[in-house]
Amino acid sequence: MQVEFDNYYKAACLKSRLSLYMVFMLACLLSGCEPNEPYTEAIPASAQRTVLLYLGVDNNFRPEAQQKIETLTTNWNKNTDGNLLVYADDGDRPALIHIYHSKPKGNVADTLTIYPPENSANPQTFTRVLNDVKAYRPAQSYGLIVLSHATGWLPAEMSYPTPVLRSVILDNGTSESNNYMELSDFAAAIPYKLDFIIFDACFMGAVEVCYELKDKADYIVASPAEVVSPGFVYASVMQHLFAPQADLVSVAREFYEYYNNRSGLYRSATVSVVKTAGLDAVAAIFKGVAGQARNDNMLQNLQCFGYGTQKIYFDLGDYVQQLLPEQYTDFQTALDNCVVYKAHTDSYYSAGKPNTLTPIRAFSGMSVYVPQAGYPVANEAYKKLKWAKRME
């Protein structure tokens, strides 16, 4: 989920409902093709890396599809050793698009295939797209960027104080009963190991999210708080992702610097790069901390990145330091080996508190949930997470 300002929900409703037809027309203009001209580029030998940008934008983010594809096409480096594919769903003509350099045409965004109208938040759709990516453009390694609305690991059936029913991806155009994808389903739907997952979505920088995905990706780039639109810096992101060793720190740093140089409510960003191989060491120490007695009054004083005034996404390091300070040094060592980069602005914005910036006094790079009587639905969902089971 990315945050819009100037009355968030009203602005979201008033956004132009651009169809992906405009994206296809843009692709044709860039490549010089006719709208129905078949895609003819030969499948090359296996490249170093294939990256998929999964645009779950069948919601008020529909204009994001055109903007991201145009930016990525314009800034594509013809010498890149890799493949960039974009899945974009506006509900009418979901498509898989390939961005590349053609000698006779220059940089182009060609449509590999058009799917029937579908639910992009359905795990089966997600798996099929990932398998299609591997079949169309095989590579030695794979990366994934997800852009959509999200609320981390929270269950989609949890209404208040979650702004809208959603979890990892939201599809408002589907006729299916489930227009969201739960975190566990998202993880299970990934059919092969990824080098990295970048979440251009809100609240995904939670230790519960990272732990759920630790066997699916080597690195995770995400924000523990809400992500202000327009999200990550797409003009330069691919030059970092197609480096021999994907430079995820530069991706995160440019995201932070972009927002840190803005003003007012737009000067809001939290971001981290998590090495999933280090999560078990973090969990081992935190298990002892989680078992300590604590009270809800103590929770009220912890650094939190929740929606509005909710107390759900607590800062992981601050929780340990406040609850069991004698364990904090060892915990910080384990955390430093896991969170390879972190950055934040002085304050953060939440759509649940319009026209307000909340100061950040502590930031460890990941949030953590603490079961509380006030959130019975979240408590039940939390018990099913791999992180919660590791704490037993």
Image (spheres, helix red, strand yellow):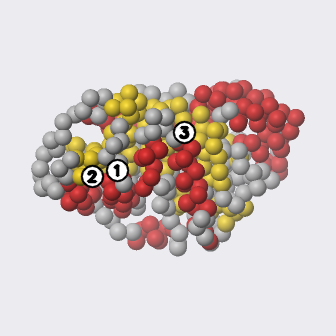
Q: Residue furthest right?
A: 326
Going from N to C along the chain, the mark reached first, 1 or 2, is: 1
Three-letter amino acid code at the position of disc 1: Trp
The residue lying toward the viewer, choosing from 251 and 118, is 251
The residue that mark 3 highlights is 220
Going from N to C along the chain, the mark reached first, 3 or 2, is: 2
Marks 1 & 3, CB-CB < 8 Å contact: no
Res 155 quadrant in image: top right
The residue that mark 1 highlights is 76
The residue that mark 2 highlights is 107
- Image location of residue 152, percent across then percent down: 56, 45
- Image location of residue 78, percent across then percent down: 31, 46
Res 117 visible: no
Viewer-nearest of discs 1 and 3:
1
Marks 3 & 2, CB-CB < 8 Å contact: no
Position of residue 285 relative to residue 197, above or below, is: above
Between the C-alphas of marks 3 and 2, the distance is 29 Å
Q: Residues within 10 Å of mark 3 (few under 14, many from 20)?
A: many
